Amino acid sequence: MKKTILITGASSGFGLMLATMLHKQGHNVIGTSRNPEKFTGKVPFELLRLDIDDDASIRSFPNELFRRVQKLDVLVNNAGYMLTGLAEETPLEAARQQFETNFWGTVKVTNAILPHFRRQRFGKIITVSSIVALIGPPNLSFYTASKHAVEGYFKSLRFELSPLNIKVSMVEPVWFKTNLGANSVKANSGSIGEYDAYRRKADAATKKGIDEAESPDAVVKKIAELIDAKDPQFSNPVGKMVGVFLFLQKYAPKVFENSILKSVANAA
């Protein structure tokens, strides 16, 4: 059955791939972008303006959306960015902004759509998180923390929405080839000399992970499966090695930790 699907951050990366595929399948896809005019004639689906860092933009968005559609079946929270850097060297303002976008922006958009889902007594909320929310690698402390926060918020929210027939799911990809790395913000001040050698290796390890990332097709496929699923599960890690990572973390934590330490130590 064809659905009406809202995808935030649909002008690039996972969002663009997913929106394009779903549009081709015949779904009514509405994407969002901070600057939709830049993509006029370049995407096959409709793009609406939404800045998840701007409260006024979020408040006005539902009126704009529901002038175009009468019902909404699925919200895909995809907008966000990645902040890299060692924890102690990351300026707190940069860390706060990471949370403003990845956590609070996602929460505010969800809250803006929830009244409609409650009135119609159905809906799905699918949020693109990250494997870092389940693991916590170095050099991504505040990105990891923001994704942990998102996971915790939706873990609780899913129980509250269950009586209203509103389903909540997370997708936790490993590294995939999107513009996430290219658009990441590097926050290291480089001000602590004791970290100099480690910082170089950690940066190299992060870059290696991005450069050797998998094709994003698996993530898009997983989200599409969740959209179609009658009763989707909450947590959905995606990636070739993700099962190994999670198994080792749970049942062989020392082996897991040593593998992370080794990956940094061996980085060029």
Image (cartoon, rainbow, N blue to C red):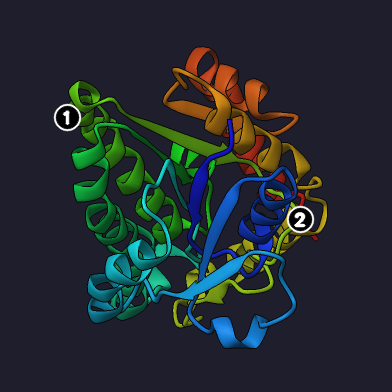
Res 136 label: none
Q: Where residue 219 sits: x, y (%)?
A: 67, 40
Nearer-the-camera pick, 230 or 239: 230
Q: Where residue 174 sits: x, y (%)?
A: 64, 42
Type of the residue with mark 1: Glu
Secondary structure state at the residue bearing disc 2: loop
Q: Residue at x 63, y 36 (%)?
A: 224
Position of the N terminus by quadrant: top right
Determine contact: label 1, label 2, CB under 8 Å. no
Mark 1: give few (<14), some (14-19) or many (20+) Cα within 10 Å: few
Q: Quadrant of residue 123?
A: top left
Q: Where residue 142 sits: x, y (%)?
A: 39, 60
For marks 1 and 2, give the CA distance. 35 Å
Q: Is residue 18 left or right of residue 131?
A: right
Q: Quadrant of residue 16?
A: bottom right
- Residue at which label 1 appears: 160
- Residue at which label 2 appears: 177
Q: Residue at x 51, y 66 (%)?
A: 81
Type of the residue with mark 2: Lys
Q: Does 166 appear above or below 84? A: above
Q: Is residue 11 left or right of residue 51?
A: right
Q: Residue at x 80, y 61 (%)?
A: 268
Tell which circle, 1 or 2, labels the residue nearer the N-terminal end. Answer: 1
Nearer-the-camera pick, 199 or 75: 75
Q: Residue at x 42, y 25 (%)?
A: 234
Mark 2: give few (<14), some (14-19) or many (20+) Cα within 10 Å: some
Nearer-the-camera pick, 156 or 89: 156
